[in-house]
Every structure is written in C-alpha cells, then in structure tokens.
Amino acid sequence: MDAVRTPFIHYVMEKAQQLLSYMVKGMWLLGDIPVYHGTQEKRNVMSDDKAFLFFKEDYDNAILHTFETEKGKCNWAITCDESFGPTFGGGRISGYDLQAFKQGKIDSTDGCFHLNGSINFNTHYRNTKVDANLINSQHKVTDIEVYQVKNEYDKEWRHKPTEDEHEEIKKRIKENNPNTYYDIARYNVLLLGQIGSGKSSFYNTLVTVFSGRLENRAAAGADETSVTNMLHDYEINSEVHVRILDIRGYEEQRGYDEEIDHLLNGEVENGYKFPEVSEPIPKEKLKKETTLADEIHVACFVEDATVIDVISPKLREEFKDLRKRARQRDLPIMVIATKFDNLCPKIQETPALVYRSPKAETSTIKVADMTGVSQNLVFPIINYTDDIEICAAKDTLALQALDKIVSLAENYVKEQIALKKKIDILCEGTDRLFIKRTEAETQKLRRDILKRIQNVKGSTMRILCVGGIKAGKSSFVDSVLSTASGIISNRATGGSTQAEGNDARTVSPLTKRFKPFPIKYKSAEGDVQTSVEICDMPGIQSRGGITLRDIKFVLRGHVPAGYKIVNHIDTGSKGFIKKPEKSKIIHCVCFIFDVTNQENESLNNDKVFRDLKKYLNEHGIPYMVVLTKIDELLRTTSEKAEHVTKMKTAIDSILKKIECRRNLLFHVKNYIHEERVNHDVDSLILDALAYMLKQGEEGINGATDFDSSEESEEDVSAEEFIDCQEPRN
C-alpha cells in the first residue's frame, strides 16, 4: 500500500466500549475490547458475546470486514494478563487470535515497530473473508492506540422517578386542595412564552396525563403567528386543583407592556381578545374587585429548547421585562423547556432518555442561563403533539413539572395569607405587636440569617434605606446592626435622637452623609465583618432635603462613602465617581415610613417616593417597606377601635403613597433607649432582614448595567473632595 491515510475508526464507536487500533503500512486492524482492565492475575479470561475484530484496507471505498467469535467460544473472547498488551482469544493451548504485544523487547526499524505478539485467526474469532497474509502477518505497525468509548447515556443527570414515584407524584398533586386550608378553589398559573414555544401543547399534555387518553382541548401549532389570541382559563380536571391561564405568545413587535400587570392581578376576564398591538385595557373590561383567589400564584415561562441559542436580543429583553414584573410582586417563577424530542433522534425514539442525554442536560443549563432561574426550576418536557398513543416517559416529565408548579403555588399562597394576617393582627392591639417566638426560636432564626449573610461572597451586597425626615432610618440601621451583633449599636445615629414634636417638613436632618455600614457579628475569633452593607442617607423633605437625583446617583454608585450628600451631588461635584465599581451600586432599597407621621408627610414627598419606585422598577432594583414607630402609635390610642382606625389609615396611606403590595410591608420596633437587645425586638428586625437579604440576592443576580448617558462626562479627582471619609465604626 501507499502512504497511510486518515484512520478509519468512527464506524464502530456506538457498538464498542473500548477499541484497539493497529495502524500498519497502509491498512488497519482493529478489535473491540468489552472493557479492558489490567490485572495481576495470569491469563484471566473474560467472556463477552459482543466482542469482535474488524479489518479495513486503507484506500477509498475499501470494504470493512468484521470477525465475530465462533459459536460457543465467547467465553474466551478476551485474555487479561499483567504481562500482555490487549489480547483477543483465550490462548493457552491453541494460541491467541490477536495479541498486540507482550512483555519483552520490541524493535523499531524502518519507521515501524516489530511487535512480539501474534495473529492466529479462527481460534475463537471466525475469519472466512480475508487472506491472513493481508492482515499484517509480520506484525509490523507504525502506531498502536487503545481507545475507551463511553456510553453517553450511562449516567443520569437528574433523577428519573420510578413507576411507584410516578404514581406518588400524581397522588400528591390530586390531594393538594387549596380550598381545604386557604379558601381558594384552585392555584392560578400563567403561561408566558414566545409564539410557538408550546404553551397550549403543554396544557394539552397535562390534560392527557390525567385523562389517560390523548387530548387536544387547546388549539396548538408551530406557526409564526400566535394560535392563541385570547385569554383562555383552563382546568385540567375536577381532581387537579390547578387553573392554567394561556395567552397569546409574545414576539418582537408585540409584548405585554400594557396588559401584564392586569394579568398578574387576575383582573382580566376569561375570553379577553388581545389586540395586535399592546394597549391599555379599558376599565369596563377588567374585574371590579379581585382577591388572592383571582391573582396569579406562579409565573410559568415556556421556552423552546431548540432555539435558545438564537433568541434575538429584543426577545431576550421582553423576557427580562416579564421576569422583572413577576419578581417585583415576589411571584415564584419556573420554566418549562419544550421540544427536547427535536434535540436528539435518540430522545425522539426513546423519551425516557431525557435525563441521560448530555444534549438535554446542556440545553437545560442553557435555558437556565438565559432565563436567569436556577437549573432545578427548569423542567424538560416532551409535549404530546402528533402522538397516537400514550407514553409513560412523557407523562412522568409533565408530572414532575406540575408537581413543582403546585408546590411553588402553595408556598406563595401561604406567604400571602400569613402577610395579610400579620397586618390584620397588628391592627388589633398592643399585645399583637411582637411575633410569637421563643428566645430559642429567635436565636435559631438569627443563626440561619447570619449563615446567609456569610454566603454573600465575591460581591458586596448594598441595601439603601430611604425615607422622610424623622422616619427612623438611622435608628433602623442601628437596630439591624444591633440584632446582627447581639450588642446595641449607635454607629448610624451616634447616640442622638430627633426631638419630639418637631415638624418633619422643616427639621434639620441629623444624618447628613451617605454612609454604608457593613453588618458585623461576633464569633469565637472576634468581630467578623461581612460583605453585606446597610446604607444610610439624609431624609426626603419638601424643603432642604435630598432630591430624587441625589438618590439616583447613590443607586448607581457615584457617591463615595461619607459624602455630605445633604448638600446635594451632581456630575461636577467634588468626589463624584465617574465610573463606579459594580460593588458600589445598590442592590435593594428599603423604604422607611413612620406610621405616626403620615398626616404630616407632604405631597411633594409622595411624588418623590412614586418617582423613585418607578425608577427602581425600570432598572430592576428590588425594594421593600419597613414601618417604624408602631409601638408609639399603640401608646397614643387608648381604645381598640381608635387604634384599629389609626393603624389601618396609616397603612392604607403608605400603600397608596408607594403603590406597593402588602407582602412588601414589614413592621419593626427600633432600638432607641435600650441598653441591651431582646428577642422580641430582634424577632421583628430579623424578619425584615431576612426579606432584605432575599431582595438583595435578587438585585445581585439581576444587577443592572446603568445607561452610560446617565453618568458623568466629567471626572473629578477624589483628592479634591473635602471631608469624604469612610464612616467610623
């Protein structure tokens, strides 16, 4: 033969687990080794009824010849010995069909290795097709390699439920009836996704799973225009307490800008027809009153896994906006990833291989990355579309997804009811101010929260407190620091308090600077400083207070620690940071409201709060609301009826002012005159801090790259900035 060509080896990759490859001058001899292991034993013979040898000369269109074991001789397919190279056939008396080499000297001349093994076909492997002289009887080779070929479907990347587990999941879904505990007939799930992603098909699949026969109740297709143009309110069946809301798919020219909030509120009537362009829904077409039973409990995004790499930037932005709107309401989010059968022919042939397929795992990771949710909230699905019979594997995938939907919905409903009760109970009297926890329970909660704080690594989490003059911002900062450390802190207030009776519209703020305070706690080794900072700044007031522009600069990280922001800051101010590091931006805003002073809050302040909240929404910055001085309000009311009226009036005023939902409200009692911490006050602070961390984590994960046009065109040296020091602890 002439010059050696490219090796022929891929032909048997799917069949072989290991391959021995001889490269001779112009031809190949290869053998399949079931799984070749070295051994300390002498001539350990292995049985394998699938072992074979094959041969192909090295020229175009040459025939591939395979040699399988003789009938009844598969027990001598392979011989393993510590002094042998790969060896086919049992040997001993009759010799080996193919022995690559054995212990001893191997010469190399003329660019070839002269192996000391042997070839002796028809001992255990049958060769009736090829002249033995063609198969390199001299045992000269230019190269020898051993390949190990792994079965890519051997390992599960996610647990596949057994038949018993499948039935248990089905039973658990049926038994979860929210009407039993929460006075809600069904959990509401909104399906959101691009046109053709498989939303309607997913609903049909769920119906099929629980009916036991193929169903096509919802019109579905893969057109470039949406098949679903109306809001459809679907039930699965009478045993499954889940309501699926299916809407038209979004596209580059058509999102849900004007409709999404109404949809999440549960205000849109069944059958509402979506116009070709998103537009405000007339009030007469919205429900007049809605309750938790009408609202959405889970936002379920449906994504086509086969196009995740080619989604346009505009569609990605549309998705991010929808995700942001859902997260602002603290709604649970999950993702149904569809069309896994189109990813791989093997999955199409055998859907049960989804959790073994590397392609499916890679696609699931890609979907998680694109959607910004954790991988365990992405569920691969193979919808029933053109099927003619039921497939147990498809049923199992759909059940796992629905099981997670029901679990998320139940937790959300529980939280909403608990939050409503907390506010209602708070309105009933002074004995309901504190959360009923034992000291041991409070200490455990504190340890759990400190662990979460310790896990904030690699980036600083910044939480900014914003509120009016005398709202209690600095006292709240000190209270958080006190609860975390276990020792009363005066780092933010400096031990000062505002004089009682001063008009919040004209009083001079005690806090004059922007001050970030790292949360610290005590350990056996001493004080530990964490990467979580709670930031204080002057209060908002109608005259002489900080402006919305000042706050925006703080949010974007342009304001140095210790800057005297009460005198305002602008792009030309000394010390203005032109290009702030990402660790300097704010990840969560905590609105602080004094419930005793809502009547004195100016309308100008209200506008600042609303405009700030709008800015936070636009940039995906999470926020929450802390109500302070509730203990003072309780002390000023002698009659329960008066207390209830005042409390509800204050809360309603704050909700109207900030236009937020009740689940974002947390009441606290600040440490003011106390000499040591106590578990009742700590319990309230810890509840607020836990949610603060949750929102901060959301802020870090979805950190906004602010528009460069909002930043300074002029950089001023920090050296010119007078009196800008890090706050002293």
Image (cartoon, rainbow, N blue to C red):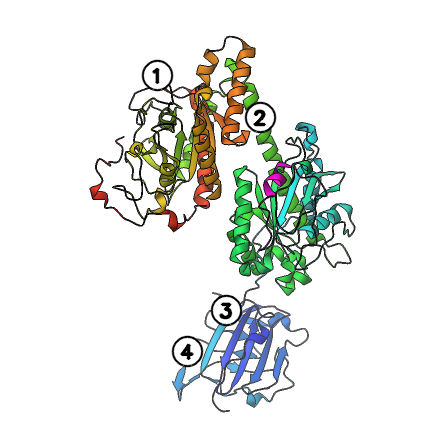
- Image side of residue 64 versus residue 612, left or right: right
Q: Which quadrant of the view contains residue 341?
A: bottom right
Where is residue 556 shown, x and y percent of the image?
37, 43
Q: Nearer the viewer, mark 1 or mark 4?
A: 1
7 drawn magenta: no
Instruction: Find disc 4 in the rendering and name its residue.
Output: 104
Helix, strand or loop at mark 4: loop
How many residues crowd mark 2 within 10 Å: few (<14), some (14–19), many (20+)?
Answer: some
Instruction: Find disc 1 in the rendering and name its residue.
Output: 673
Instruction: Find disc 2 in the rendering and name its residue.
Output: 420
Helix, strand or loop at mark 3: loop
Q: Identify the residue at image location x=69%, y=45%.
A: 231
Q: Amino acid at mark 2?
A: Lys
Q: Nearer the viewer, mark 3 or mark 2?
A: 2
Helix, strand or loop at mark 2: helix
For the residues labelled 2 and 4, the Cα–Cα distance comes to 84 Å
For the residues labelled 1 and 4, the Cα–Cα distance comes to 90 Å
In front of the other: 490 or 19: 490
- Image side of residue 146 versus residue 267, left or right: left
